Image: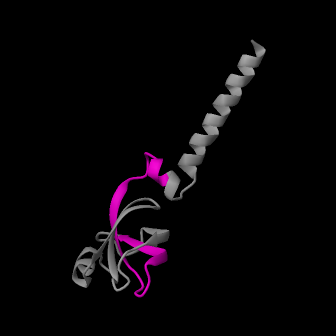
């Protein structure tokens, strides 16, 4: 009986640590499964000549300051300069290249 109680307490503690880690650690894997991180579309200006972007400042529509900085993101068009990013925290679901006009319309800098 005593072993079962210790095993149950240990299992409960491990579950609590796992849940706390998912809620408190923000990376692409934990943000994907964290129910409190909303999915949203943001806009960014990215450097040309590459498909791997680091420290990308994301702007939500009508925001003048960056709302989030993505640590890393990949694209598919090295000539593209402006992107719409569908993301959930650090987890990037979709990248769409947009024109300068669409970017300027959505983001007030």
Q: Which residues are magenta?
A: 31-59
Depth check: 72 or 35 in front? Answer: 72
Is residue 6 shown in magenta?
A: no
Please report the residue visible at 64 percent of the width from the left and 40 percent of the height from the top: 17
Is residue 58 shown in magenta?
A: yes
Depth check: 69 or 99 in front? Answer: 99
- The percent coordinates of residue 41 (x first, y second) are 32, 64
- Identify the image quadrant of the N terminus: top right
- The percent coordinates of residue 98 (x first, y second) are 26, 77
Please report the residue visible at 32 percent of the width from the left and 80 percent of the height from the top: 82
- Identify the image quadrant of the C terminus: bottom left
- Is residue 53 left or right of 76 when viewed as pictured? right
- Is residue 54 left or right of 104 when viewed as pictured? right
**How many numbered circles are shown?**
0
Instruction: Give the quadrant of residue 10.
Output: top right
Please report the residue visible at 47 percent of the width from the left and 77 percent of the height from the top: 53
Instruction: Give the quadrant of residue 67.
Output: bottom left
- Residue 4 vertical position relative to residue 72 in the rendered view, above or below: above
Depth check: 48 or 45 in front? Answer: 48
- Is residue 72 left or right of 103 when viewed as pictured? right
- The percent coordinates of residue 72 (x first, y second) are 50, 70
- The percent coordinates of residue 48 (x first, y second) are 40, 87
Looking at the image, which residue sits at the far front? 76
- Residue 1 vertical position relative to residue 55 in the rendered view, above or below: above
Looking at the image, which residue sits at the far right? 2
- Residue 49 vertical position relative to residue 3 in the rendered view, above or below: below
Please report the residue visible at 34 percent of the width from the left and 86 percent of the height from the top: 79
Depth check: 6 or 105 in front? Answer: 6
Q: What coloring was used for the rendering?
A: one colour
């Amino acid at each position: 009986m005593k072993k079962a109680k210790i095993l149950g307490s240990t299992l409960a503690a491990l579950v609590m640590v796992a849940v706390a880690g998912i809620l408190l650690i923000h990376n692409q894997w934990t943000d994907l499964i964290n129910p409190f991180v909303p999915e949203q579309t943001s806009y960014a200006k990215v450097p040309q000549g590459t498909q791997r972007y680091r420290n990308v400042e994301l702007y939500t529509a009508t925001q003048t300051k960056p709302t989030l900085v993505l640590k890393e993101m990949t694209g598919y068009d090295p000539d593209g300069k402006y992107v719409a990013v569908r993301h959930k925290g650090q987890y990037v679901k979709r990248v769409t290249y947009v024109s300068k006009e669409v970017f300027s319309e959505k983001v007030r800098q």
